Image (cartoon, rainbow, N blue to C red):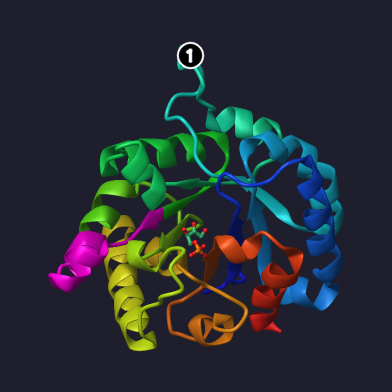
Amino acid sequence: MTRRPLVAGNWKMNGLMASLAEIAAMGTAYDVYLKTRVELILCPPTTLIGLALDVATQGGVGLGAQDCHADASGAHTGDISAEMLKDVGASYVIVGHSERRADHGETDAAVEAKAAAALRAGLTPIICVGETRTEREAGEALAIVGRQIEGSLPADAPGTIVVAYEPVWAIGTGLTPTLADIADMHAFARERIEARLGGGKGRTVRILYGGSVKPANARELMSVANVDGALVGGASLTAKDFMAIAAAYR
Ligand SMILES: O=C(CO)[C@H](O)COP(=O)(O)O
């Protein structure tokens, strides 16, 4: 892993204009030393990306979006293309989050098309995978994640893409897998990513862990082999908690 680890915040459907002050506070706390240790990005709702650009750039915090359409433009009422996100200052986009897979019926093929669109537009996709509780209890977690990696990563993607392992049952619940289970899953994900993209590229892909990452558990979660950072939901809403998580890399 040559790139810095990545800590990404996903604000989901939260955040109004007043929330820009939190982004400014994140930039203030993201000091010169921390910048050398960890890359920090925030994915606010699309409505705030353009507005946040100045304040985020000043603080050295990158910006991402939470979804994009697979087409560059066209008759898709209500949708946003990767080109549009790039145009307002995003450099990353989350695709295939479990909430989109569940709420909008997104298939692996749809996620792959979105990831490819992101790459065409010059954005780095953060491709989410993860099993449900039922699937884990049935002993199918590895098979499900393997299938999602195979189906959701464009085969010709560069080694700069990001994959986020987020067990659905750990999202917003305060539950996390054991460190041993995370280590097993991330080692397996690394192997499947290398099989999909080729060993050279697969080795440099950053694999984030997501699901109830908090200031209290960030350091131990981030110390697991093949965990190259975190995708943080609820705890990314305040600068205090988000920067306490980033501080795991101090
Ligand atoms: O999207 C997530 C993090 O970006 C994920 O859903 C985890 O959310 P959290 O459990 O609220 O951290």
Asked which secondary structure carries label 1, the reply is loop
Q: Give coordinates of residue 73: x percent, y percent.
A: 51, 18
With 125 as the anchor, is 156 left or right in this view?
left
Which residue is painted at 31% across and 48% down in the image?
152
With 146 as the anchor, is 59 left or right in this view?
right
Q: Which image quadrant for residue 179?
A: bottom left
Q: Give coordinates of residue 36: x percent, y percent.
A: 74, 74
Note whether 162 is above or below 220 in the view shown: above
Where does the C terminus fall, quadrant-wise? bottom right
Residue 137 colored magenta? Answer: yes
Camera-nearest residue between 27 and 16: 16
Q: Is residue 119 visible?
A: yes
Camera-nearest residue between 98 and 107: 98
Q: Give coordinates of residue 38: x percent, y percent.
A: 67, 72
Of all residues, the one furthest to the left in this rendering is: 138
Camera-nearest residue between 77 and 95: 77
Which residue is painted at 77% across and 49% down in the image?
19
Q: Which residues are magenta?
A: 128-146
Residue 40 colored magenta? Answer: no
Note whether 66 is above or below 79 in the view shown: below
Mark 1 Cβ inside 8 Å of ligand 1: no
Of all residues, the one furthest to the front in this rendering is: 173
Q: Residues within 10 Å of mark 1 (few under 14, many from 20)?
A: few
Amino acid type of the residue tagged 1 in the rendering: Gly
Q: Which image quadrant for residue 89?
A: top right
Q: Give coordinates of residue 225: x percent, y percent.
A: 43, 84
Of all residues, the one furthest to the top in this rendering is: 75
Note whether 108 is above or below 200 in the view shown: above
Q: Is residue 96 visible?
A: no
Which residue is painted at 32% across and 45% down in the image?
102
Residue beneath disc 1? 74
Which residue is painted at 84% across and 49% down in the image?
55
